[in-house]
Image (spheres, grey):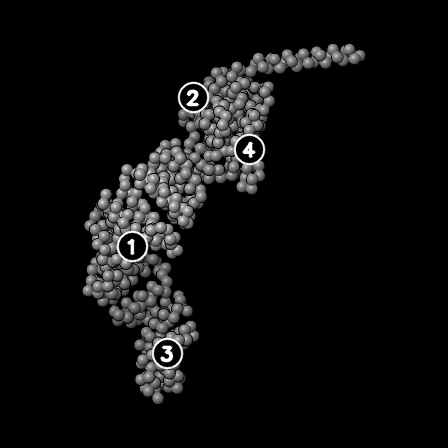
């Protein structure tokens, strides 16, 4: 009995050994080496919990690889696990196509050279044999073979295959190989209800061609992945991509800039942009030091030295005029002015002159600012902003004989817009109204205030009505003045300046009850407001309430009102 059992076991072992040899003989010659290019992938969510697991393969020895996109949707990090069990982190997403469920990414390779698959750029035709190369840590792998049933076009110049080849969901993204050992396609997820022998696969050349474009880097497919994105493949596209992504979170944008500088170390733009980020977003002495070093590098590399000096002037100015500036070395407005002068010494661009004007303005050097702005205004780059800046500098020079010139300059700002004026012209029309008041032209000011009101579709605040009321009073448009000050108080019922104006205007037009109510409210809000007590006293006196009038006027006198004493005598 034991002898028979031993004989059967020997027969079974011989059969298994023969089967193993048969499998090994059936496996293509390239299979043993190629299997090392296939790996397992694990993706993790934001809480570092496993999100998905799947397969992929390397397409070059630099660590670039492809897999199915759905593995990565929602992932914050990912690792690949090689056939030798080594874990390598995914560092960058290089491109994705959600429709065809493919993604290209990069890992950080170790010291050992990676095994990669050669991509067949021609493809296979119906009737040709293909092999499926699965991920396996075992040295003996059962390679599946099958036939191409159909080849159709995908994304215009690539192929999509229907294969007579049995697969399971665990084999998604494994490579489909041709007879020469080149990868032809990636296995796609099985469709519901399909038979066990039908498999679909997408062109591996399509997957390998994926990249991030300058204008497509923020696609929904890429935004759904939290892993860092790679730069576009060309230097010019990468520059555009930096611009398009400059509104990202500071740390994320810094990562892009670091990648750009690493990839294109002789491009000054990367250093200038990184210096700008350090100054604008990180704002501490250590980052200012790094910004200074980056700008020194940019000045060395940038063939346009004027641009580098201009950028440094802007950075220094931005810090010097910040609400809480960082005291860093000699980064003052004077140094910024020196840098812009160096830029102008190389190239007299209007932009540089405008910056010089801004710096003089910030330093309170209004004649110099005015001169700089007017130089810009003599070029074809004059804008509403530069005309208005010149007007502001001239106004602040304090020469009351030049108020008409201020109006003329703001006219030029307004007239950069065609009639009917767009909403963007409204701030300049508002400023012109105030300039007209300074020039003694209140009726024209009222016209501008009306235009401003129209452009903003009536969506104005109490200050607007207060300002227009001032112009209406000066223009003797009395009813408009009363209506406007009432509206101002209605919108800002606790504004003492509006209330005292209402009290004054109503007292002037003998609207005594309204004047008394407004004046009393001011004394409640600001008990030491002498004008409010005086106006209150006068109005009460005019109503014959002499005792109350004297009390209010006495309080005004105590608060230093020079007119109060004479008024007290009037109501004795």
Q: Residues within 10 Å of mark 4 (few under 14, many from 20)?
A: many
Of the numbered discs in the image, which one, if any, rests on residue 559? Answer: 3
- Counting residues from the start of the chain, the first of labels 3 and 2 encountered is 2
Of the numbered discs in the image, which one, if any, rests on residue 121? Answer: 2
Which structural element holds mark 4? strand
Q: Quadrant of residue 494?
A: bottom left
Q: Nearest to the eye among marks 4 and 3: give it.
A: 3
Q: Viewed as shown, does residue 365 lie left or right of 94?
A: left
7 or 158, which is in the foreground?
7
Of the numbered discs in the image, which one, if any, rests on residue 42? Answer: 4
Q: How far apart are the alpha carbons under marks 3 and 1?
A: 44 Å
Q: Viewed as shown, does residue 93 lie left or right of 475?
A: right
Q: How far apart are the alpha carbons under marks 2 and 4?
A: 29 Å
- Counting residues from the start of the chain, the first of labels 3 and 1 encountered is 1
Decide: is 166 above or below 556. Answer: above
- Counting residues from the start of the chain, the first of labels 4 and 3 encountered is 4
Q: How far apart are the alpha carbons under marks 1 and 2?
A: 58 Å
Report the residue at 59% width, 19% height from top.
140
CB under 8 Å between callouts 4 and 3? Answer: no
| Residue 154 visible in rendering | no
Give the percent coordinates (x, y) of residue 302: 30, 38
Q: How far apart are the alpha carbons under marks 3 and 2?
A: 93 Å
Residue picked out by circle 1: 425
CB under 8 Å between callouts 1 and 4? Answer: no
Decide: is 555 above or below 206. Answer: below
CB under 8 Å between callouts 3 and 2? Answer: no
Q: How far apart are the alpha carbons under marks 1 and 4?
A: 56 Å
Q: Residue furthest bottom?
A: 572
Which quarter of the rendering shows the N terminus?
A: top right
CB under 8 Å between callouts 1 and 2? Answer: no
């Amino acid at each position: 009995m034991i002898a028979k059992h031993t004989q059967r076991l020997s027969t079974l072992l011989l059969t298994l050994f023969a089967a193993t040899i048969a499998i090994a003989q059936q496996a293509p010659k390239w299979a043993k080496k190629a299997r090392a290019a296939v790996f397992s992938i694990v993706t993790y969510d934001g809480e570092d919990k496993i999100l998905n697991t799947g397969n992929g393969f390397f397409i070059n020895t630099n660590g670039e690889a492809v897999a199915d996109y759905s593995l990565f949707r929602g992932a914050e990090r990912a690792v690949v696990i090689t056939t030798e069990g080594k874990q390598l982190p995914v560092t960058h997403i290089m491109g994705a196509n959600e429709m065809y469920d493919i993604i290209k990414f990069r890992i950080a390779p170790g010291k050992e050279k990676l095994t990669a698959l050669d991509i067949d750029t021609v493809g296979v035709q119906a009737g040709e044999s293909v092999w499926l190369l699965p991920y396996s840590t075992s040295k003996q792998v059962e390679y599946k073979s099958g036939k191409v049933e159909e080849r159709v076009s995908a994304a215009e110049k690539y192929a999509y295959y229907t294969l007579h080849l049995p697969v399971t969901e665990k084999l998604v993204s494994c490579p489909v190989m041709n007879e020469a050992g080149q990868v032809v396609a990636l296995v796609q997820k099985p469709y519901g209800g399909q038979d066990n022998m039908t498999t679909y696969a997408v062109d591996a050349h399509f997957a390998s061609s994926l990249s991030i474009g300058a204008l497509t880097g923020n696609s929904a497919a890429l935004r759904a992945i939290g892993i860092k994105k790679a730069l576009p493949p060309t230097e010019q596209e990468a520059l555009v991509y930096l611009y398009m992504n400059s509104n990202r979170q500071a740390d994320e944008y810094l990562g892009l800039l670091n990648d750009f500088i690493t990839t294109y170390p002789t491009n000054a733009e990367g250093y200038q942009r990184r210096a700008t980020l350090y100054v604008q977003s990180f704002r501490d002495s250590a980052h200012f030091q790094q910004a200074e070093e980056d700008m020194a590098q940019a000045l060395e590399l940038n063939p346009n030295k004027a641009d580098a000096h201009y950028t440094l002037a802007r950075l220094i100015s931005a810090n010097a005029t910040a609400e809480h500036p960082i005291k860093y070395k000699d980064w003052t407005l004077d140094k910024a002015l020196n840098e812009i002068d160096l830029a102008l010494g190389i190239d007299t661009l209007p932009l540089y002159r405008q910056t010089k004007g801004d710096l003089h303005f910030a330093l309170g050097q209004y004649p110099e600012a005015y001169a700089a702005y007017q130089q810009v205004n003599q070029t074809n780059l004059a804008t509403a902003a530069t005309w208005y800046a010149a007007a502001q500098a001239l106004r602040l020079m304090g020469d009351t004989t030049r108020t008409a010139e201020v109006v003329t300059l703001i006219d030029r700002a307004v007239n950069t817009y065609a009639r009917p004026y767009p909403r963007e012209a409204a701030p300049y029309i508002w400023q012109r109204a105030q300039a007209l008041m300074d020039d003694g032209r209140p009726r024209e000011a009222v016209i501008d205030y009306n235009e401003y009101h129209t452009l903003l579709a009536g969506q104005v605040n109490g200050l607007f009505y207060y300002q227009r009321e001032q112009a209406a009073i000066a223009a003797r448009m009395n009813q408009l003045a009363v209506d406007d000050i009432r509206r101002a108080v209605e919108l800002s019922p606790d504004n003492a300046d509006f209330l005292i104006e209402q009290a004054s205007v109503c007292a002037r037009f003998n609207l005594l009850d309204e004047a008394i109510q407004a004046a009393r409210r001011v004394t409640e809000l600001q008990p030491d407001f002498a004008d409010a007590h005086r106006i209150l006293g006068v109005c009460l006196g005019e109503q014959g309430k002499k005792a109350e009038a004297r009390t209010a006027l006495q309080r005004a006198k105590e608060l230093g009102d020079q007119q109060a004493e004479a008024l007290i005598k009037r109501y004795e």
